[in-house]
Image (tube, rainbow, N blue to C red):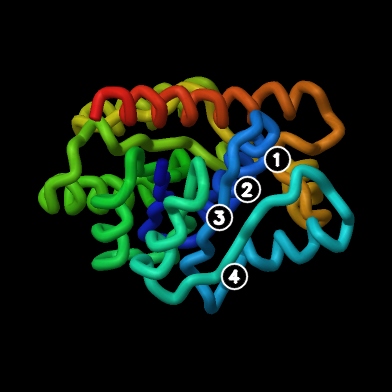
Amino acid sequence: MILSLISQKGGVGKSALARLLAVEIAKAGWSVKIADLDPAQGTSTKWKARRDLAGLQPDIAVEKFRTVDRALKEADRFDLMILDGPAHAEQGGRVMARASDLVILPTGYSLDDMEPQIEAAYELEEAGIPTERLLFVFCRARGSEAEDRAARGYIRKAGLQALGPILPEMASIRQGHAEGRAASEVPFPKVQEKVIAVAQGIVDQLTAEREAA
């Protein structure tokens, strides 16, 4: 299976989601690889180096790729290939999406975060990607329940779907990333519970889309 993470701007939690998913899926016994398609930034690749230095398990395969096509050639070797796309992915984003069983569009609560991602979703729909294969996930989220409801309403009015659980913005998660950990590996059970729910929700959607295909 192939899952893409696509964003029109940086800093919305795309790589945080990639790392969370890779670790939780690997814990479930799947073989998984993150294709880091932003070689200039290399966020996931640098995280992998820190993880290896700390000797953390499970071991997560991460590799930099300059093109989507090269990454896709590796996909058959793994149960799941996670395509961690660059910010401002345009043509490459369409190639990623066409090859994917599910496309994740991370976003924050602000209009500045949501509007570029909604535009990206519409462009993918125009390119022939089914709407049900596009899933918004609120990441680095910090706000009230009212703000959450308003953001979900905005996504819904745009004719798109958003995952229920959110990936919160927390100092413990940032510190975990600095240590080579995923968000689910921080030493706080309440944080673990929240972020594992995000991973499980995405996996459920991914398997449902694969079965429907």
Q: CA distance from mark 1 to mark 4?
A: 18 Å
Residue highlighted by disc 1: 183
Residue 58 in which image quadrant: top right
Which is more toward the observer, 99 or 75? 75
Q: Amino acid at mark 4?
A: Gly
- Of marks 1 and 3, the one in the foreground: 3
Name the spot of residue 34 as percent of width and height, x first.
55, 55
Q: Earlier in the sequence, mark 2 or mark 1?
A: 2
Residue type for callout 2: Arg
Residue type highlighted by circle 1 = Ala
Whether residue 102 is situated above or below residue 210 in the rendered picture: below
The image shows residue 60 at horizontal and vertical percentages of 68, 51
Q: For the residues carrying marks 2 and 1, which lies nearer the camera in this image? A: 2
Left or right: 46 with respect to 40? right
Q: Which mark is residue 42?
A: 4
Residue beneath label 2, please? 19
> Closer to us: mark 2 or mark 3?
3
Tag 3 residue: 34
Could you tell me which residue is drawn at 13 percent across and 53 percent down? 127
Whole-percent x, y for residue 36 in the image = 53, 64
Q: Quadrant of the N terminus?
A: top left
Question: Marks 2 and 3: CB-CB under 8 Å?
Answer: yes
Q: Residues within 10 Å of mark 4 (few under 14, many from 20)?
A: some
Q: Give the crowd class for mark 2: few <14, some 14-19, many >=20 residues within 10 Å.
A: many
Residue found 74% across the figure and 28% down from its top: 191
C-alpha separation, residue under disc 4 versus residue under disc 3 = 11 Å
- Element type at mark 4: loop
Q: Secondary structure at mark 1?
A: helix
Mark 4 in CB contact with mark 3 (< 8 angstroms): no
Image position of 121 (left or right of 194): left
Of labels 4 and 3, earlier in sequence is 3
